[in-house]
Image: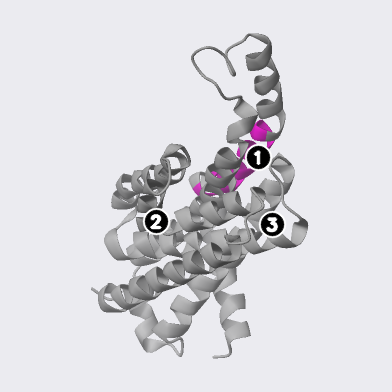
Amino acid sequence: MLMTQLVTKLGRNDAKLIGRDSFLIFMFVFAAIIALVLRLGMPALNSYLIEAGIMPGETIPISLSDVYPMLVAYMALYTGALLVGTVFGFVLLDEKDQNTLRAMLVTPVSLSKFVAYRVGMSAVFAFFIVLGMVLIINQALLPLWQMILFAAAGALAAPIITLFFAVLAENKVQGFAYSKFGGISGWFIMIGWFIPQPWQWLCGIFPPFWIAKAYWLALAGSSWWWLVLLVGIGLELALIGWFIRRFNKVAYR
């Protein structure tokens, strides 16, 4: 089966699965809510904290605007991809519950093409969601060509999350239990922002941290941002490859 036909057929099925699940629809809506809240809320809160003498103040020497890059990295570059990955992960769990994967054994669709579709579609959707979020937030922005690069790199977290659900969860009930790990893992980005060098690099055990770090370096005018970004992309692709191999072993279990 041609890949275009596969995308069309599976895309229609995905649209049906997502359309009848209010939780999955809310994941997409939630991304827009996050972006709008940050766009309107961060500047207003920053002004209030400055006027109140809280940030900066005697206890907290920095202003809220100083941590905008951390908030954008966590809430847009990572969380945007996390939400998309969760949606496609739950679609996969729906297909597990409905024995769709077993039914594929008697169809022309190979498992490798199916996985390629899942990885590709989640990454593409995440790219547009992440890019849209950072542009809506409109804080700590780089030139558009750089933001496109970071959105594409950050989007690779989506297939990681999707495959994480597919490999570890047997059904949607387990999927809800595992979903908390995605958000908690993102704390590496927030914590890493406050850890001094060189200890900050220990957070690199979490591949999306490298994307955030490259973004911060680019904002700071460092010429090394591109190298850190390439390392992050390489680690994310390696993790996707590992999850794909695991999925191939457990798909029909």
Q: Which amino acid does label 2 sit on?
A: Gly
How crowded is the residue under tag 2: few (<14 C-alpha within 10 Å), some, or many (20+)? many
- Judging from the image, what secondary structure is the residue with disc 2 in? helix
Disc with the residue nearer the chain's start (1 vs 2): 1
Disc with the residue nearer the chain's start (1 vs 3): 1
Residue 230's tag is none
Q: Do the numbered discs 3 and 2 sit on residues whose CB atoms are within 8 Å?
A: no
What residue span does the magenta drawing correspond to?
A: 24-38
Q: What residue type is labelled 1?
A: Ala
Q: Does the magenta stretch include residue 235?
A: no
Q: Does the magenta stretch include residue 32?
A: yes
Q: Where is residue 49 in the image (x, y as percent from the top left)?
A: 63, 16
Quarter of the image for residue 250 reads: bottom left
Q: Which amino acid does label 3 sit on?
A: Met
Quadrant holding the N terminus: bottom right
Disc with the residue nearer the chain's start (3 vs 2): 3
| Residue that badge 3 annotates | 147
Quarter of the image for residue 129 reads: bottom right
| Residue that badge 2 annotates | 204
Between circles 1 and 3, the one closer to the viewer is 3
Front residue of 189/175: it is: 189
Quick one: which residue is furthest to the top in this view? 52
Q: Position of residue 74 (x, y in %)?
A: 52, 44
- Judging from the image, what secondary structure is the residue with disc 1 in? helix
Q: Do the numbered discs 1 and 3 sit on residues whose CB atoms are within 8 Å?
A: no
